[in-house]
Each structure stands twice: as structure tokens, then as C-alpha cells.
Amino acid sequence: MLEVALTRVLSVMSWHHFAYLIISLAFLGFGAASTFLSVSPRFSSPTLDEGLVGKYALAFCLTTLFGFAATTKVHFYPMDAYYYGDYSNAFSLLMLYVIMGTPFFFAGVCIGYLISRAGEAINRVYFSDLVGAGIGTMASLVGINHLGVEATIYVASTAGGLVALIFSLAEGRFRLRLGSAAALVLSVLMTVLAVRHEIFPTYFPPEKIFREALRPHYYRWHIIARIDVMDPVSLSMPFGGALSKAYEGGPMPTVRVIWQDGSAPTGIMYVPNGDLRRVPALGYYLQAAPYAVKPNPSRALTIGLGGGIDALIALYHGAEHVVGVDVNPVTVDAVKNRYADFAGRVLNRPNVELVVAEGRHFLTTTDQRFDVIQLSGVDTYSALSTGAYALAENYLYTVEAMESYWEHLADGGILSFSRWLFTPPRETLRLVVIQLEHLRRMGIEHPESHLMIVSGGMPDGVWAETLLKKSPFTQAEVAAFRRWADYMKFDMIYDPYEMRPNVFNEVIRASRSEREAIIKRYPYNIKPVTDDNPFFFQFYRWRSLVSPLESGGGYFIERLPLSLAVLLVSLVQILLLSIAFIIGPLLPRGGQLRAVRHKTRVLTYFGSLGLGFIIVEITLLQKYAVFVGGPIYSMAITLFAILVFSGLGSLMSQRFKDSPDRWLKFIIIGLVGAVACEVVFINYAIPRLMFLSHAMRCGVTIAALAPLALLMGMPFPMGLRVTQRVGETIIPWAWGVNAVTTTLGSVLCVLVSMQWGFTVSLVAAGAVYLLGLAVFSPVVRAMYKEA
């Protein structure tokens, strides 16, 4: 729960790239705790000391409670270091590490100590640990959405205070009882207060100047993003497009800007008395491009509704029925209810349907066909709550997504995207490459006749609108579109009937082999992305870290290879902190380890378990996202199922405690087989099960994950039982190595998935498990042969 909440906090205080570093801190905190348990003399007694559990639970409670207050006071400017070469705030980053990492250390001490003293009950304790993690994941979703992130953090603190009080009552010392009771009461009080009002407001960095420039009228936390709605202002901000220069001198629309995590703006437009004719700017937006070809459409769909401007544009241009889809229920509520009067209740009309859903998921639940499908600037600036990725994966821009949109276009329907153009082009250019790959798969002989692209300028860059038509554009349609673009003072980039000297014409009119050659030599990565490798926004190649490319246009954060930089920073951070806090403290005891037989095999085994488990968990979390309805549902269902059933697997493994030499190899081989079955099921069965209702999909997901997760929970406790026979000295090292590889795996999974796709990640995880089995099997045989 705490880990998820802090990820949300860092997403606001910095950028989503940096928020993922919290996952490393959590794992390293637990790893450092296992080392501390092994070197601290106070934990040397073989019997459980309830007072020690109470003390460290109390420490977790207090560091969580006061750590959040301290976090909001540390001003960290992440962009200064990379963008300006200013490393003066490195101390602030170190402070954040210490403040945020300390509660995980104390929690790790409590859990590790209880497991180490569990004896024959180790399976039940490990089961409780995993099930508790699953429940915490679900609780974090509910807590952040309904209580807010600050109150959720205090709920985690309250849990620590409750544990401290329970163990202090068993221990019997009055001071510990009093301190635990006081901490518990304080945590509950802070939780209640934080539900109604921010006690310690979250800090926004200077580079998020947009949010700080305006006064917030309303805010609300959600697991997807924090939403800040501002007081009304008159401005020309295009919100995923551009306002025509032909409109210069016209009245600027009045808008309530909505910021998501302090950036990624959208807006609710003021419509006096619900009369769209009194907002003439709606006729001059770049996002109106499809209506120049398809006026008065019967049905229009906007994915990424935001503040509803795309829906207003559709209605302004005569759409008879409009469907607006947005993944964030807070945004939809703001448009439909809280600020409905401000928007003239236009989006409350009977011919407007607002849906809370992930865009791809919505399309699998409807058989409607649309004349226009519009996506304007829909992206993933907000950190995914899983903390799993340092890159923004987006399933709205894959080849499979284009196929889904295509199926829901009416005859002659138009699919319209608004994305940054950049100099040199990359976002819009990659989008075009993806659409060309989709058309190739559909068997379209002349894809060049299905596309048109137009661009519009902004003070800080250029947006482009890409139109993909289900049937070829006619000469009359192209002529009408050119006239519209000329009148609006937009620039035509591509149309089927005129050759223009730019990379878009070169790519679109090229043969398949010629296009592949262009993609290969292009300075940016513009290869088409698929659901197996959905990193649309990862344009940079590794060499760009040492030789940055010149770039213009767009939001400045997109001009930097930040995602790659964060991956490298994460790797270096994990290695250094692991040496300092996990391996380092154990080195003085290295002499004891030298005498232990099979130490290399034991440590390799536990390292393999940590690496394999985290890769499988993260990969399946992503692979089921579209099927169950988006990353939030995937977290609530997939992650919960993996953790709970792994806990049950740990409990079931107690049946094999006396004969792991007989069963362990079959369990791991079965686990690898289950991974292979998941690969086949995800890639071949799931696409054919999209017709199922949401409830049935969730049931199918749980049923598909259960066998694998049960097996994933068995090797660790069974390995610990074997290791106890090898020698108690090596057990802390086994815990430490497992923590290090689990942390490394969260980054390595990204690297493998980014380069080769999620399927390869799962195959790699299976190979890691087999490696662990091959290395550890001789140890198991030796220990039980001797017995």
C-alpha cells in the first residue's frame, strides 16, 4: 500500500519517469533488513521476542507518518540535472531516498524476523506475507481513489501502529504499549483529517509551471492521476491540437484547465446557455480536420475525453451522436456533474454518451460503428501505479489497436489522431509507420490513398493531424480538405494526389523493403509497435544518451531520452545500494560463508527465484491489461491473483516438506510449463475471448493465473528448508541475493521487453527458473542423501 501511494506522490513531485525509483527503494529496504537481522546481536536468540517486533513496527508507523511530511518539504528538481547539467540538488535526491526508504527497512525487519523464527510454520507465515501484499495492493487502489494519497499513507501507518500495539501487549512493557497506542491514535486522527483536507500539500516542481501558474479550484487524487481543476481563464491552449491562425482576433474561449499530475493538460470549455454557436473557436481547431472530409457524421467517438473539447468539436460540426470515453472517472465526473453547468450541460444531452473505460477495452464491449474516431494527444504521462516501468507503454498506438479501430469504423469512416510532429518528426511519423503496417496486414494494395496529414503551429511546437480512411480518399475529398487547410492556415504534409518533399511522403510511398531501410537508418526509433512491445513513446536509441539529438517542438520533457537515463540510473542505484546495505554488511562474516558447502549453488538458486518471479509478475501484469480493462484493473486482478495464489502455493508446499528432493524438480518444471502455457494462452486464446463480458474476463484471468501462481509460491519456502540443512550461516545471504535480483529484475524486465517484447521476457523468466533448478538440484540430493 505504501509503495503504491509513494509512487503517486513522486509522479506529482517530479515526473513519472522518476516515480518508478520507489520500487527499487522498497525491495532494497527489505533486502537491507534481512542483512541487518543477520548481523545484529539483538536478533541472535532463537526464540521470538515480541517486543522487538513491536518496536520495529512502531518505527515503521512513525517513519511512515512523519516521513510523508518530510517528503513534501524536500524540493527536488529532477530536470535540472539532465536538461541543464545542474547537479546541485543531488543532496535532495539522497534525502528523498533516505526518507522514503526507511519505512520499508523497518517493515522488512518485522517480516523477516517473523519468518526467520517461524520454524515449522514458515509456509504459513510466507503465505500470510504474500496474501497481505495482495490485499495491500487492492487496498491501495480503494484508498487512493476514495480517501486520497495522503490518507492512504496514513492508513499504512495505522496498520503499523496496530501491529506494534498487538505485539507490545504480548511483550508487556508499559512504555512500548503507551508509545504504540499513542502512535495508533495519531495515525487514525491524521487519516481522518487528511480525508477532508490536505495536511501537507504535495509539492509541484518548477518545471510544472502550468499547474503553478493558475489557482486550483478543485483537486482529487486517483490511482491514474491527481486531477487539479483551475479557475476559469480565457486562453488559446489547444489541448491536443492547434488553434488556427485564421482565428486571430476572435474571442478566446473560457476554459477551466484540468492538470493531470501537474502536467498533461485538458480543459472544460465554457458554453453559454449550452449554445455551441457562441463558442466559434470550436470551428478552428486542428482536431476538426476529419469533419472537413466527413461533415455531419452520424456517430463520432472520442477516446481520451478529457475535458470534453473533442466531443464539443464533433457536436459543433453536426455529429448526431457522440460517445466520449475516458479511463479516469474523476475527469468524467468533473465534466458530467461537478462542472456540467459551466459547460452548458452540452455533454449531458441525450445524444451524448460518456463512458468510463480504457479505449481499447471499450471497443471490445460494443458493436457500434462510427463515422469518426478521434484521439487527440492521448498519452501516458502519469505513472502506472504498479511502479513497474520506467517507460510509458501505451496500447492505444499499437498495430493491434489500429485493427480494433478499423473494425469499428463505418464504411468510409475516418480514424483521426492528433500527435506532436517534432523536428525531425518522430511521434506522428511512427504513428504513420504503424498505420502502414496495419494496412499491410489488412491486405490493402494502395495504402498511400488512405492517408492524409495536416499540421498546425503553436508557440512551442507543432501538432499534426493524421487521417486514416477506411476507403480511399477521393479527389473531391482531398480537394475539399486542401481548401479547408488553406483557409485555416494549416500546412498540408501529405495527401494522395500531390508529392511533397518530406519524410512522410518518402515513407508512405515506399515499398515494404524501402520503408524498412528508412526506418533502420532514421535517427529515431520509429519501428511499428505491437501489443507485445507497446512502447510507442520510446523513440530514443541507446547512443542518444551520450550524443543527444537536436530536437524541436513538443513538450520539452519529450525531447530527452529520460526513460533510458532512468533505466541506467536505476541499475547503478540498485548495484551501489545493494553493495552498501545488503552485501556490504555481510562481508565481515564472509569467513563463515567460506566454510559453507554449495554456497554458490544456493545463492544462484535464490537469485534465480527473485529474478524469475518479478519478471513473470511484471510481464503478466502488462499482458492482461487490455483484456481486463486497463492497467488499473490489471493491477487489481492480475497482481492480486498472483500474490494470493502464490501465498496459497507456499502453504500447500508444506505437504512436501519432508521430501523436497522428490518434488522440487517437478514443481519447477511444472512452473516453466505453466509459463509456456501462459505465452500460448495470452497470444492466441485471449484475442479470441474479447467477446466475453468484463466479469467473465476477470474470471478467466484468475483461472488462467491460478495454476502458475500456485507453483510460483512453492520453490522459495522449499528452498529455505533445504538451505537450513546446508547451514544457518548462508540463509541471510540467500535473502539478500534474492532481494537484489528481485530489484534488478524490475529493471531488466523493462530492458528485455523494450528490445524484444513481453513474450521473450516470459521465455527468459522460464529459462532463469530452469537455471536455478539445474544449479540447486545437486544440493537437494546431497542434503537428503546425507539425511
Image (cartoon, rainbow, N blue to C red):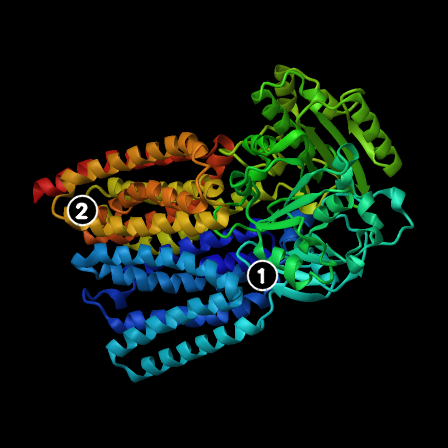
In terms of secondary structure, where does tag 2 sit? helix
Residue 591 shows up from this direction: no
Coordinates of residue 741 in the picture (x, y in percent): 37, 45
Count of residue discs: 2
Looking at the image, is 743 positioned above or below residue 205? above
| Distance CA(mark 2)–CA(mark 1) | 44 Å
Residue nearest the viewer, comparing 65 with 128 = 128
Residue 24 shows up from this direction: yes
Mark 2 neighbour class, 10 Å CA radius: few under 14, some 14 to 19, many 20 or more: many
Image side of residue 599 versus residue 641, left or right: left
In terms of secondary structure, where does tag 1 sit? helix
Coordinates of residue 268 in the picture (x, y in percent): 72, 56
Coordinates of residue 206 in the picture (x, y in percent): 69, 59
Identify the residue at image location x=22%, y=62%. 117
Q: What number is the disc on residue 92?
A: 1
Looking at the image, is 692 positioned above or below residue 637? above
Identify the residue at image location x=75%, y=43%. 241
Q: Amino acid at mark 1?
A: Ser
Identify the image quadrant of residue 479. top right
Identify the image quadrant of residue 480. top right
The answer to whether the residue labelled 2 contacts the one labelled 1, judged by CB atoms less than 8 Å apart, is no
Answer with mark 2 or mark 1, whichever residue precedes in sequence: 1
> Which residue extends farthest right?
249
Image side of residue 250 versus residue 703, left or right: right
Q: Amino acid at mark 2?
A: Val
Image side of residue 462 versus residue 654, left or right: right
**Residue that numbered label 2 is attached to:** 722
Mark 1 neighbour class, 10 Å CA radius: few under 14, some 14 to 19, many 20 or more: some
Q: In the picture, which quadrant includes the C terminus?
A: top left
